[in-house]
């Protein structure tokens, strides 16, 4: 039996792989302008954003009343759960991704709700900056740590 953190990590990994198969560019743990943190925010080839909330179990879903706030920062909202999750708990207007091991399938599309153009531009800039910074950190961890220290000293 997987622990909650292991289950969450497995769902997240399989979901990110599905995003790549769909030609969506996924970023994990993205803080949005409203202060909420999206588990996965993915950029689609058409420039649309998909927010994916990973739920490790029913208790995780029931304890989370903040997920509707993600609609303002995505064109589509999905829940990603594993195959053991009782799907009847999830709302019908939210997309559904179900994982099993390292595999994932998109079982239900999300209702769409287009973001205002100004919010989309701001989110696209935030997404690009975050992705570039994470790539720089992965490529040169010591350099980024030194840069952060220098910026804090100023």
Image (cartoon, rainbow, N blue to C red):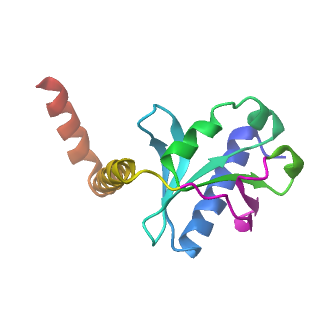
* Residue 29 on the magenta span: no
Q: Residue at x 33, y 53 (%)?
A: 121
Q: Residue at x 62, y 58 (%)?
A: 13
Q: Is residue 90 above or below residue 62?
A: below
Furthest residue toward left: 154
In the rendered structure, which segment of residues is drawn in magenta?
91-113
Q: How many marks?
A: 0
Q: Which percent across, then down, holds residue 127?
A: 37, 52
Q: Is residue 103 left or right of residue 129?
A: right
Q: Which percent across, then down, holds residue 71?
A: 57, 45
In this rendered view, identify the residue nearer to me: 40 or 33.
Answer: 33
Please tell me in which quadrant of the rendered image residue 97 appears. Answer: bottom right
Q: Is residue 114 left or right of residue 104?
A: left
Q: Is residue 2 above or below residue 69?
A: below
- Quadrant containing the C terminus is top left
* Residue 98 on the magenta span: yes
Q: Which percent across, then down, holds residue 137?
A: 31, 50
In this rendered view, identify the residue nearer to me: 95 or 93.
Answer: 93
In this rendered view, identify the residue nearer to me: 2 or 24.
Answer: 24
In this rendered view, identify the residue nearer to me: 138 or 100.
Answer: 100
Q: Is residue 132 above or below residue 6?
A: below
Q: Residue at x 35, y 55 (%)?
A: 124
Q: Residue at x 73, y 58 (%)?
A: 96
């Amino acid at each position: 039996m997987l622990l909650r953190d292991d289950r969450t990590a497995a769902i997240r990994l399989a979901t990110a792989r599905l995003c790549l198969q769909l030609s969506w560019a996924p970023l994990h743990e993205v803080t949005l302008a409203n202060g909420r943190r999206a588990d996965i925010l993915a950029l689609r080839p058409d420039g649309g954003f998909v927010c994916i909330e990973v739920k490790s179990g029913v208790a995780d879903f029931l304890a989370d009343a903040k997920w509707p706030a993600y609609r303002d920062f995505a064109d589509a909202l999905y829940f990603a759960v594993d195959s053991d999750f009782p799907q009847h708990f999830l709302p019908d207007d939210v997309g559904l991704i179900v994982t099993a091991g390292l595999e994932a399938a998109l079982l239900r599309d999300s209702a769409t709700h287009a973001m205002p153009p100004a919010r989309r531009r701001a989110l696209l800039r935030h997404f690009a900056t975050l992705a570039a910074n994470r790539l720089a950190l992965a490529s040169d961890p010591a350099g980024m740590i030194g840069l952060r220290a220098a910026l804090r000293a100023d």
